[in-house]
Image: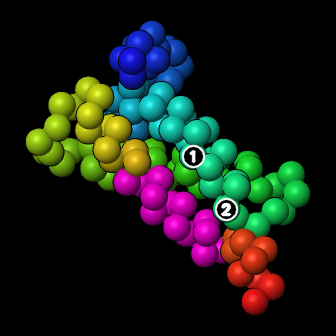
Amino acid sequence: MLEELVGGGLPSLNYFGSYLNIPGKAIQMSLIFSIIGTVLLTRVTAALGNLTAPLNFIALLIGSVGANYLLADVIMPFEPKYQKPFIVSLGGMMVAALVMMIFLKTEQAKAS
């Protein structure tokens, strides 16, 4: 299913990925998972009005693409086309989500 979702590809994302020395599929997976992660993270962070979701999306995308960039040359025991970008993207997004949860605390945590 992931291959069908990411398989088609967008040429501009593939070009951007080659500029950063990241496979184009990793950029597409980063975008897809950042959108999904934004929906989940916005539910647990404080409401800043219309700014919360874009801030979460940007942080998750930077975390995901940054992790793929930093670990591009690291050899891992995963399949390099889909599994490695998937695992690395989720790891980078977890770090970014923790940072966002620290800075944008929930309303309940601020009240206590």
- In the rendered image, residue 43, in percent from the top left (x then y), is placed at 70, 55
- Residue placed most toward the observer, 112 or 86: 112
> With respect to residue 9, does 95 lie above or below?
below
**Three-letter code for the amino acid on which mark 1 is drawn:** Gly
Q: Is residue 75 left or right of residue 10?
A: left
Count how many numbered circles sit on residues in the image: 2
Residue 61 shows in the view? yes
- In the rendered image, residue 109, in percent from the top left (x then y), is placed at 71, 81
> With respect to residue 66, does 78 lie above or below?
above
- Residue placed most toward the observer, 64 or 70: 64
Secondary structure category for the residue under label 2: helix
Q: Is the magenta stretch mostly helix, strand or loop?
A: helix
Specify the label residue 15 is tagged with.
none
Q: Which residue is drawn at 33% across and 47% down?
A: 88
Q: Which residue is drawn at 45% across and 47% down?
A: 64
Mark 2 vs mark 1: in front: 2
> With respect to residue 106, does 35 lie above or below?
above
Q: Which residue range is magenta in the image?
A: 91-103
Q: Residue at x 46, y 17 (%)?
A: 5
* The N terminus - image quarter: top left
Q: Is residue 49 left or right of residue 15?
A: right
Q: Earlier in the sequence, mark 2 or mark 1?
A: 1
92 falls in the magenta region: yes
Residue 55 shows in the view? no
Q: In which quarter of the image is residue 15?
A: top left
Q: Which residue was labeled with disc 2? A: 44
Secondary structure category for the residue under label 1: helix
**Three-letter code for the amino acid on which mark 2 is drawn:** Val
Specify the label residue 37 is tagged with.
1
- In the rendered image, residue 19, in percent from the top left (x then y), is placed at 42, 32
- Residue placed most toward the observer, 56 or 16: 56
Q: In which quarter of the image is residue 73?
A: top left
